[in-house]
Amino acid sequence: MSIMILAAVLVVLGCWGTIIGMGYRYEKNWTKDFELELSFSQQQAAEGDNLWLYEIITNNKEMILPAVSVRFKTSKFLKFEDMDSGSVSDYFYRNDVISVRGYEQVRRKLRIRCARRGIYSIQEAELAGRDYFLQRTYLDKKAVDAGLIVYPSFVGIERILPLFQKSYGDMRTTVPMFEDPFEYVGVREYMPGDRMNRIHWKASAKTGNWQVKTSAYKAGQPALILLNLGSPGNFINQAAMEENIRIAYSLVHFLDRRGLETMLVANGGAGFRLQGSGKGYMGQVRRKLAAVTYETQVQSGVGMLQRERDNLAEHVHLFFISSQGKPDIQKELADTLHRGVSVTWVAVTAGGEDDTRQLLPVLEPCIYRWKA
């Protein structure tokens, strides 16, 4: 009887030793020759677009990994089609569990919708490995490099066109929207962004380089678009701010397509100022608007108007895109009108907050109320 007990004890000890040995081997080697790669199917997208996040897991060793959890953090504005394997707070925490055999590569495609413009990145993933008996969990981290720029979306042409038509009555007497291709005062060398219908073929043939016609209109007098990202109330109105950004992007694009140079100034975050026209300029506008913030360090809307006084030349039309309309801003806009500047104030409202209920009478003709 004692021999049987001893044998049983030895078997148990042997099994226990095997389990301990396997656990030690797993803990020591489970991340060895293990690779993880995350990448988006494209590096740039527009607000509302759908794309894929690729997840590639490679186990370059013989040892089987029975259960590996891959966890990573992304913005909550990147909406996964399958939201069951994650949790949402200020960020979305993705958590997928897979089994990987020896010398196996597992590829996964996760469908994502870009719910809001922004610059997004995934720089680290956490691995959680369960041992062969699913009793213990081991943790490790892997550096990854997945980046995505999401640009603002356009507002509908049916909404931007009335805004343009309201402003065009002022602009057509000061800034030519369509240049006459037969009226020009000289030629200059071709620059990126120049339109093909401006090429002077005879001059180009004589010089051997592309030459374009220059008209009497001076491109140094653009339409000025001021994007004020200050919220009207005590709290940040994200819906209104995002709509302000979409309108600014749509307006720059709309005017650019009609041959008009623009200057775009924003006061969110560190702020920025861009001026130009053409494809390269629009690329700069997209990137700046994708990155601009309004959570902190938003400069005063009044200060913005005051700083731009020197840019409000006689032939410039001012588009002021702002949900804020407090008395000091209205007074500054009224002073701008009194200086002979044509103004269109795009006043965006969302969630019931409206600073324009009490409006100076002089501003009534130039305000364009926009409900997000």
Image: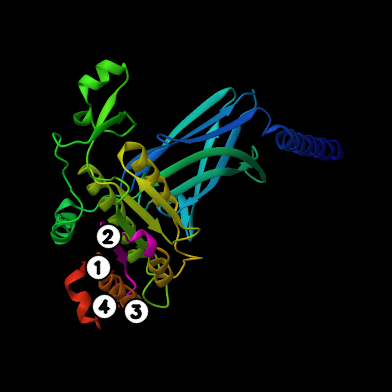
For marks 1 and 3, give the one nearer the viewer: 1
Q: Which residue, given by chain and number where applicable, does mark 3 sit on?
A: 326
Tell me: residue 84, above or below residue 16: below
Q: CA distance from mark 1 to mark 4?
A: 22 Å
The Cα–Cα distance between marks 2 and 4, rounded to whole angstroms, is 27 Å
The residue lying furthest to the bottom in this view is: 358
Circle number at residue 17? none
Earlier sequence position, callout 2 versus callout 4:
2
Marks 2 and 3, how far apart at CA: 26 Å
Please state which of residues 278 and 74 is positioned toward the viewer in this rendering.
278
Residue labelled with disc 4? 356
Q: Residues within 10 Å of mark 2 (few under 14, many from 20)?
A: few
* Magenta-drawn segment: 309-326
Q: Earlier in the sequence, mark 2 or mark 1?
A: 2
- Disc 2 to disc 1, C-alpha distance: 7 Å
Amino acid on which disc 4 is placed? Thr
**C-beta proximity under 8 Å, tags 1 and 4:** no
- Please, what secondary structure does the residue beneath circle 2 have? loop
The spot of residue 322 in percent (x, y) is 32, 67
From the image, state whether disc 2 or disc 3 is nearer to you: 2
Mark 3: secondary structure: loop
Q: Which residue is mark 1?
A: 340
Q: Which amino acid, mark 1?
A: Gly
Q: Residues within 10 Å of mark 3 (few under 14, many from 20)?
A: some
> Looking at the picture, which amino acid does disc 3 mark?
Lys
Front-lying residue, 317 or 239:
317
Q: Earlier in the sequence, mark 3 or mark 4?
A: 3
Give the number of callouts: 4
Q: Earlier in the sequence, mark 1 or mark 3?
A: 3
The reply to whether callout 2 and callout 1 are in contact (CB within 8 Å) is: yes
